[in-house]
């Protein structure tokens, strides 16, 4: 009986997260593909010189199913920029309108930066990621798993660490240990 109550609570929290982010999620996607660009003045000047930087790259981003039982890959296209990792997380945060999947990021949460050192990606979010997070343990696992599995689609990234306002965090809401970089979370994939 307790497991059933936990599942109902997790589904309710996931629905609340989806409803809270609906008004901001409508702008980013047409169908199941989105083109996201992470550009800076240096990348736009290098793209005119190299030609290959204007090409689109197909990537997989991961969203929880509506029952929060696992993550499902959605293919999106991003511009091949100097920071394709940041573009990938931006594509994830843009959300999806694909039926049966939920958007996972809290309202007003922003991606500040993605840096890669060695085989570890550090993903820096604004404090609204924690402040506006309304999910429980399942919601936290789905959000973290979405970020980790999206970035570890790139073979050169083996682990992902989540930062808030440039600082390492122990957890988003008390359920997952985020103090160390996390490897791909294959147990969540459907």
Image: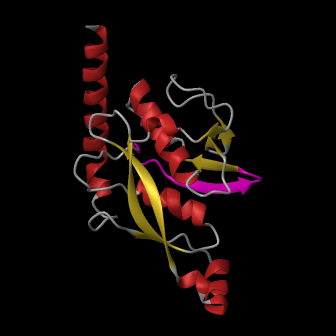
Expressed as whole percent of the image width and height from the top left, the position of residue 39 reads 57, 74
Among the 4 quarters of the image, the one containing residue 116: bottom right
- Image: magenta residue range: 105-119
Instruction: Identify the image quadrant of the C terminus.
Output: top left
Q: Nearer the viewer, residue 103 or 150?
A: 150
- The reply to whether the magenta stretch includes residue 50 is no
Expressed as whole percent of the image width and height from the top left, the position of residue 178 reads 61, 32
Determine the residue positioned at 67% across, 45% down.
166
Residue farthest to the right, as pictured: 118
Expressed as whole percent of the image width and height from the top left, the position of residue 118 reads 77, 53
Determine the residue positioned at 52% across, 31% down.
172
Expressed as whole percent of the image width and height from the top left, the position of residue 156 reads 68, 57
In this rendering, the answer to whether 116 lies above or below 52 is above
Q: Nearer the viewer, residue 119 or 88?
A: 119
Please state if 12 lies on the left or on the right of 91 as rendered. left
In this rendering, the answer to whether 34 lies above or below 180 is below
**Residue 13 in view (yes/no):** yes
In this rendering, the answer to whether 98 lies above or below 56 is above
**Residue 130 in view (yes/no):** no
Count the marks: 0
Please state if 24 lies on the left or on the right of 118 as rendered. left
Residue farthest to the left, as pictured: 99
């Amino acid at each position: 009986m307790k497991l059933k109550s936990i599942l109902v609570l997790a589904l309710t929290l996931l629905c609340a997260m989806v409803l809270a982010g609906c008004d901001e999620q409508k702008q980013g996607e047409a169908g199941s593909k989105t083109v996201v660009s992470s550009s800076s003045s240096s990348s736009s000047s290098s793209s005119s010189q190299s030609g290959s930087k204007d090409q689109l790259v197909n990537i997989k981003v991961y969203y929880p199913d509506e029952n929060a039982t696992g993550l499902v890959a959605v293919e999106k296209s991003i511009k091949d920029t100097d920071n394709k990792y940041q573009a990938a997380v931006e594509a994830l945060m843009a959300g999806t309108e694909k039926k049966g999947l939920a958007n996972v990021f809290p309202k007003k949460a922003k991606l500040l930066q993605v840096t890669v050192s060695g085989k570890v990606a550090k993903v820096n979010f604004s404090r609204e990621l924690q402040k506006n997070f309304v999910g429980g343990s399942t919601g936290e696992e789905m959000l973290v798993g979405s970020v980790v599995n999206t970035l570890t689609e790139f073979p050169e990234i083996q682990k992902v660490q989540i930062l808030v306002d440039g600082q390492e965090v122990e957890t988003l809401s008390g359920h997952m240990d985020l103090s160390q970089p996390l490897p791909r979370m294959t147990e969540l994939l459907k």
